[in-house]
Image: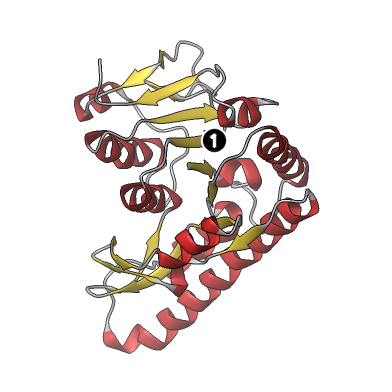
Amino acid sequence: MIILKIGGSILTNKDSKTSEVDAVSLKRIASEIKRSLDNSDKELVIVHGAGSFGHPPAKKHKIGEEFDESEYPQKRLGFCEIQNEVKKLNMFICEALIEEGIPAIAVPASGFITATDKRITNGNLDLFKRYLSKGFVPVIYGDVVLDDDLEFCVISGDQLIQYLAKNLNPSQVILGTDVDGVYNKNPKTHDDAIFFDKFTSLKDLDTLEGTTNVDVTGGMVGKIKELLYLADLGIESKIINAEVEDNIFKVLEDKEVKGTVISRGN
């Protein structure tokens, strides 16, 4: 089984003030996934970020921060607004996948996952396993969930990857971002940015000056921390550039693609 995460920055314009899908990228990625599924038999779970659909309302409503009891009705509405926005993006993504002939089925995190202090503590994956056994491609995404400590919180796609991988034991974990992998600084704004072909320790994070995408769910540093946890369980992952044509197809076929491997090995 393969877990493929596609970043919100690939599927949407994250800098947009309105919810905006990158239809060209979405169609290309859906086509590459379909080619791979046709080329070789595999179980696949797709995770996607919230992008310009989820991040603006999450910041606006400050979901995941402590609040006064009098604010609860407004926070609850904010929760609903965010959940509705990310559901819209998921609908566009599933629609594109289905148009390619992929049996994509939406499985929203807010429907079966709960958290404690912003970390997933409960979520039954029996439905995931059942969908996979019947040949479906489950599609889950960054979402808002109920939190035992904070009432509500945001759960990123990267945390979902960790939770799914820990419980489903995939053969591959792939993150498609808008850069070739991990650099010590943003390669889009620094010509002297140094590329890392491998990350093996939290100490390596000390060399990073920043992240390629600073967002409410942690950016690149947050991704690496989640994946290093998986590395401790013996699950290797790879961060690649999903904006490069054929990269998704190649990595799903286990072909050579430039990227950063997250592993505890040498």
- Determine if residue 243 is in view: no
Q: Residue at x 42, y 54 (%)?
A: 156
List x then y, in percent, for residue 185. Answer: 41, 23
Count neighbours of disc 1 (C-alpha within 10 A) and say few if under 14, some if 14 to 19, many if 20 or more. Answer: many
Return the residue nearer the eye: 90 or 4. Answer: 4
Count of labels shown?
1
On screen, residue 31 above or below 87: above
On screen, residue 95 above or below 262: below
List x then y, in percent, for residue 27. Answer: 76, 43
List x then y, in percent, for residue 177. Answer: 54, 35
On screen, residue 212 above or below 159: above
Return the residue nearer the eye: 235 or 191. Answer: 235
- Determine if residue 192 is in view: yes
Q: Residue at x 47, y 25 (%)?
A: 181
Q: Quadrant of residue 67?
A: bottom left
Q: Residue at x 22, y 30 (%)?
A: 202
Position of residue 232 in the picture relative to residue 80 (left or right): left
List x then y, in percent, for residue 58. Answer: 46, 63
Query: Coloring scheme of the render?
Result: secondary structure
The three-letter amino acid code for the residue at tag 1 is Gly
The residue where tag 1 is placed is 176
Position of residue 113 in the picture relative to residue 56 (left or right): left
Please tell me whether mark 1 sits on a helix, a strand or a loop. strand
Name the image quarter holding the C terminus: top left
